Amino acid sequence: MKDMVCIVCPVGCRISVDEENDYSVIGNKCPKGATYGKKELTFPTRTITSTVKIKNAIHNRLPIKTSTEIPKNMIFDIMRELNKLEVSSPIKVGDVVLKNILNTGADIIATRDM
C-alpha cells in the first residue's frame, strides 16, 4: 500500500494505492483521485513551467510551459535542453518555441507576449 496526497485539485485528499490489487485507490473524494493514484504509480507525468533566454526583448527571460505532460523521469533532461535554448523577439503567447522536445511529443509554448 502506497500512501500519498492527490494533487489534481485543491482538496488534497490523502489516498492509498494498493499496488498488489490492480492499483485500487481508497481515500479519494472524487474520481480524479483514483485516476491520479494509479497513474502516479504506473507512469508519473508532469507539466513543466519555466523560462528560456530571449534576445531583443524587454526582459531577459521568456516564460514557457510544455504543451502536454511529460514523463517525470525526463524532467532534468528537458530542463538541461531548455537551459541551452535562446529565442528572439517578437514572440506571442501560444507560439511554439521548440517542437517535440526530446521526442516526448510535447512542444515548448510561450506563455507571454514579448
Image: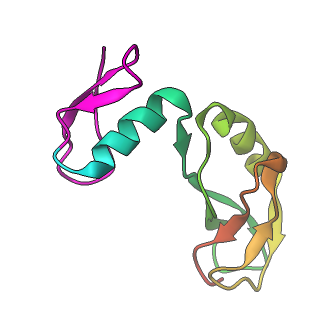
Side (left or right) of 107 relative to 20:
right
* Residue 107 image point, x, y percent: 73, 63
- Which residue is drawn at the image coordinates 75% and 73% (left, top)? 96
Residue 24 found in image quarter: top left
Q: How many marks?
A: 0
Front residue of 16 and 10: 16
- Which residue is drawn at the image coordinates 78% and 81% (left, top)? 89
Q: Residue furthest front?
A: 21
Residue 105 found in image quarter: bottom right
Side (left or right) of 83 relative to 14:
right
Image: magenta residue range? 1-28
* Residue 74 image point, x, y percent: 69, 36
Residue 108 visible in the shown view: yes
Residue 60 visible in the shown view: no
- Which residue is drawn at the image coordinates 21% and 51% (left, top)? 30
Colour convention of the picture: rainbow
The verdict on residue 19 being magenta is: yes
Note whether 54 is above or below 41 in the view shown: below
Q: Quadrant of the C terminus?
A: bottom right
* Residue 63 image point, x, y percent: 59, 66
- Which residue is drawn at the image coordinates 53% and 45% (left, top)? 46
Q: Quadrant of the N terminus?
A: top left
Note whether 7 is above or below 15 in the view shown: below
The verdict on residue 35 being magenta is: no
Note whether 94 is above or below 31 in the view shown: below
